[in-house]
């Protein structure tokens, strides 16, 4: 929760200053945030620095936002607030916890003149509830969150909102549409864990270009018959982070009555182990009609996204499709947990995406899509495409190229959050704010 006040509530107060007094003792310096004159403000960097500050601070203080506003340019107010509110909630608020002993709560007091800065504060507060909802979904273990339970929780969360439409395709409806890649990933699951495709749309009669956000929803990933080792199984309940983030984005959009023409899709499965699971060398015909040779059953996320991408263009008439997924562990070697990588088939959209990320105080990095990467994914001797190429070079980029094959004309954007969707083993709804700004204000 964010406590707003225009008065001091606690003993110590953090203030922003141009220069830190060198005569201050070590303890007093903790309550001075130095912002140098003419220093470039980068919201994503500010977020990471404040997150580290909060992690070390285990008692309540006042934070004088007014002092920051005096030193930050007006165009950076919202980015600053997004950074500080979001990392405050991440560090001090745990929406999904099953400890029997209550956790000690820290709630800092934010001092702010709402008459002067209220509109910026209220914009940033939109994300507090949405991110908390996404973090709760991501944090739930698989025995509490299978595809059916995911849909149930989402319906309950959206129940009071009248400007949205929710649709769910079950296993039989997916089979009728021949969404065989999505079904294949979940075919080893028992009946109560059957695959589903969740769709949520804004009802606003918008004539704007259609945007569809697709989030990977693997509620648990064993790797299938290409079984993960025990150390890689840990944290696989987070493999549905993309789905949680897109529904959280929609919750924020619906809450502010956005006029964007947007739908979110969450393909939901459990990649289980069983005698009827998909096997290496299987060939599956996708919803697009293209055939895919399975070379790795642990490259399952791209399969459920592929059919969903085709559905977004064919059934929902998307002009732009954005996928967000914990897709490849390889991306950690390239960017660690600092930047979220982005691939685009229309590079002209990158500047629009960068503007959204800047407002959101999130860091992105433009990655390449190249015909040589595409060729690697078309190396099968018996099918149109392989789901995982064997050389492993540029594995994150070849995965992005794979996904791009499943739309025809729509612009395609891909975000791989495999190294940015958690911090210190806690779920992080990365890119939720960026997707909100992208759909609400920026993307053309």
Image (cartoon, rainbow, N blue to C red):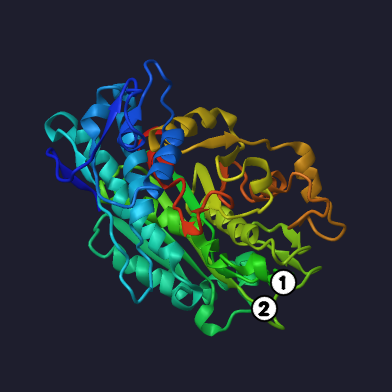
Q: Nearer the viewer, residue 94 or 358?
A: 94
Q: Nearer the viewer, residue 179 or 388?
A: 388
Rendered residue at 37%/46% (across/down): 54
| Visible residue check, residue 410 | no
Rendered residue at 49%/46% (across/down): 318
Query: Residue 369 in the image: x percent, y percent?
Result: 69, 38
Label 1 near label 2: C-beta < 8 Å?
yes
At mark 2, the secondary structure is loop
Residue extending farthest to the right is: 381
Which quarter of the picture shows residue 14? top left
Nearer the observer: mark 2 or 1; the answer is 1
| Visible residue check, residue 51 | yes
Mark 2 neighbour density, 10 Å: few (under 14) some (14–19) many (20 or more): some
Query: Residue 56 in the image: x percent, y percent?
Result: 40, 48
Rendered residue at 41%/34% (across/down): 46
**Distance Cα–Cα, label 2 vs label 1:** 8 Å
Q: Earlier in the sequence, mark 2 or mark 1?
A: 1
Which quarter of the picture shows residue 80? top left
Residue 273 circle label: 2
Quarter holding the C terminus? Answer: top left
Query: Residue 388 in the image: x percent, y percent?
Result: 75, 56
Query: Residue 264 in the image: x percent, y percent?
Result: 44, 54
Please name the residue that numbered disc 1 is placed on.
227
At mark 1, the secondary structure is loop
């Amino acid at each position: 929760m964010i406590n707003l006040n225009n008065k001091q509530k606690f003993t110590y107060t953090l203030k922003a200053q141009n220069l830190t007094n060198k005569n201050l003792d070590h303890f007093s310096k903790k309550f001075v945030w130095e912002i140098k004159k003419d220093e470039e403000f980068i919201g994503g960097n500010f977020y990471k620095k404040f997150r580290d500050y909060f992690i070390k601070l285990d008692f309540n203080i006042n934070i004088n936002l007014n002092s920051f506003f005096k030193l930050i340019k007006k165009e950076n107010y919202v980015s600053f607030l997004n950074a500080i509110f979001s990392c405050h909630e991440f560090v001090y608020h745990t929406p999904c916890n099953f400890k029997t002993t209550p956790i000690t709560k820290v709630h800092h007091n934010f001092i702010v003149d709402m008459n002067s800065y209220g509109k910026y504060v209220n914009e940033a507060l939109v994300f507090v509830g949405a991110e908390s909802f996404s973090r709760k979904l991501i944090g739930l273990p698989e025995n509490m969150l299978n595809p059916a339970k995911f849909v149930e929780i989402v319906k309950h969360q959206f129940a009071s909102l009248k400007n949205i439409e929710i649709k769910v395709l079950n296993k039989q409806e997916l089979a009728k549409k021949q969404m065989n890649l999505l079904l294949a990933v979940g075919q080893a699951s028992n009946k109560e864990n059957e695959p589903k495709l969740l769709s949520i749309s804004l009802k606003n009669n918008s004539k704007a270009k259609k945007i569809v956000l697709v989030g990977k929803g693997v509620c648990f990933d064993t790797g299938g018959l290409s079984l993960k080792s025990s150390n890689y199984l840990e944290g696989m309940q987070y493999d549905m982070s993309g789905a949680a983030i897109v529904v959280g984005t929609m919750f924020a959009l619906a809450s502010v009555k956005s006029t964007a023409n947007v739908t979110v899709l969450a393909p939901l499965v459990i990649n289980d182990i069983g005698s009827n699971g998909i096997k290496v060398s299987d060939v599956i015909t996708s919803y697009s009609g293209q055939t895919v040779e399975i070379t790795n059953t642990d490259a399952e996320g791209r399969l459920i996204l592929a059919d969903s991408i085709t559905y977004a263009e064919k059934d929902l008439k998307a002009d732009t499709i954005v996928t967000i997924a914990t897709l490849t562990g390889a991306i950690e070697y390239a960017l660690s947990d600092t930047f979220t990588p982005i691939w685009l088939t229309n590079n002209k959209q990158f500047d629009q995406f960068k503007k959204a990320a800047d407002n959101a105080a999130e860091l992105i990095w433009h990655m390449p899509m190249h015909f040589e990467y595409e060729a690697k994914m078309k190396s099968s001797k018996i099918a149109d495409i392989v789901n995982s190429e064997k050389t492993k070079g540029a594995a994150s980029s070849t995965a992005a190229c794979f996904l791009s094959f499943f739309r025809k004309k729509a612009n395609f954007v891909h975000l791989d959050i495999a190294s940015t969707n958690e911090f210190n083993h806690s779920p992080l709804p990365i890119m939720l704010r960026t997707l909100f700004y992208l759909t609400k204000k920026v993307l053309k």
